[in-house]
């Protein structure tokens, strides 16, 4: 199978995965909202940043978080979305932008080492925090945020090979100062629209 064909197949799978994840995410939100009034997205995590420091959700309290789950080997979707995040923050009034921490969390910890994350995130924003960890840690974080992901191999490719892509959902989450879910931005959201959405939230909630 050619790489072009693989990319097309993965793109279709990604769309299906995003649709499924969105439905599950909304189902979870509706279930949680009926009992607590808050969306069941987000929660505790323990990961390692690009400087090798252990970070938990508590380290980000007091600031809004703009979070994206992806991986450094991603050929197109991840860098596109991370660039949108960076451009959105740059488009904001500095006082508002400084209240938002951009965060990239890996769904591919087997290849996304601390060094790989450290070399990757500065391309998108100087304040972006990159997080990785053990397979158990990243799996737990993805589950907490209802993120779908799975390895995707080309036909005939050995399943123990490093030559794989990651099929994953593509949402940018905006989390509140207390770590609660506020809203998400779909794949394809323009930087100016993301900036507008962030500004509206920060101005409304302070």
Image (cartoon, grey):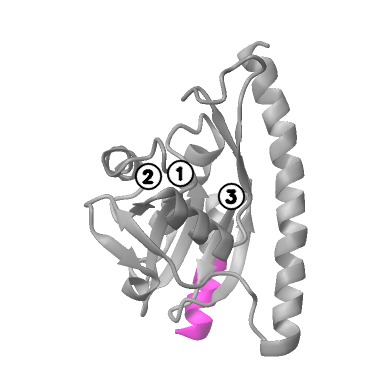
In the displayed structure, would residue 177 be above or below residue 164? below
Task: Answer with mark 3 or mark 2, whichever residue precedes in sequence.
Answer: 2
The rendered magenta stretch, by its main secondary structure, is classed as helix
Q: Mark 3 points at which residue?
A: 190
Q: Name the residue under label 2.
A: 124
Dot label at residue 83: 1
Question: Is 74 within the magenta?
Answer: no
Q: Where is residue 31 in the image (x, y as percent from the top left)?
A: 75, 78
Kind of element beneath mark 2? loop
The residues tagged by marks 3 and 2 sit, at their Cα atoms, a distance apart of: 15 Å
Specify start and end residues of the magenta stretch as a single range.
197-206
Residue extending farthest to the bottom is 36
Pair 1/3: label in front: 1
Is residue 102 shown left or right of residue 147? left
Q: Where is residue 155 in the image (x, y as percent from the top left)?
A: 67, 17
Quarter of the picture holding the N terminus: top right
Q: Where is residue 170 in the image (x, y as percent from the top left)?
A: 61, 48
Kind of element beneath mark 1? helix
The residues tagged by marks 2 and 1 sit, at their Cα atoms, a distance apart of: 5 Å
Foreground pick, 21 / 44: 44
The residues tagged by marks 1 and 3 sit, at their Cα atoms, a distance apart of: 10 Å
State the image quarter where residue 28 is shown.
bottom right
């Amino acid at each position: 199978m050619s790489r072009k064909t693989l990319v097309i197949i993965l793109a279709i799978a990604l769309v299906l995965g995003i649709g499924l994840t969105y439905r599950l995410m909304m189902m979870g939100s509706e279930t949680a909202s009926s009992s607590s009034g808050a969306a069941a997205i987000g929660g505790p995590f323990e990961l390692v940043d690009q400087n090798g420091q252990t970070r938990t959700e508590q380290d980000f309290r007091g600031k809004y978080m703009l979070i994206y789950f992806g991986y450094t080997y991603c050929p197109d979707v991840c860098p596109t979305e991370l660039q949108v995040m960076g451009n959105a923050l740059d488009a904001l009034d500095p006082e508002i932008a400084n209240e938002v921490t951009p965060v990239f969390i890996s769904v591919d910890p087997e290849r996304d080492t601390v060094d790989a994350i450290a070399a990757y995130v500065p391309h998108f924003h100087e304040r972006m925090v990159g997080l990785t960890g053990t397979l158990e840690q990243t799996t737990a974080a993805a589950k907490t945020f209802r993120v779908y992901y799975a390895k995707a191999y080309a036909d005939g490719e050995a399943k123990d090979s490093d030559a794989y892509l990651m099929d994953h959902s593509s949402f940018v989450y905006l989390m509140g100062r207390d770590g609660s879910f506020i809203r998400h931005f779909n794949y394809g959201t323009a930087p100016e629209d993301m900036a507008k959405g962030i500004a509206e939230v920060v101005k409304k909630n302070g």
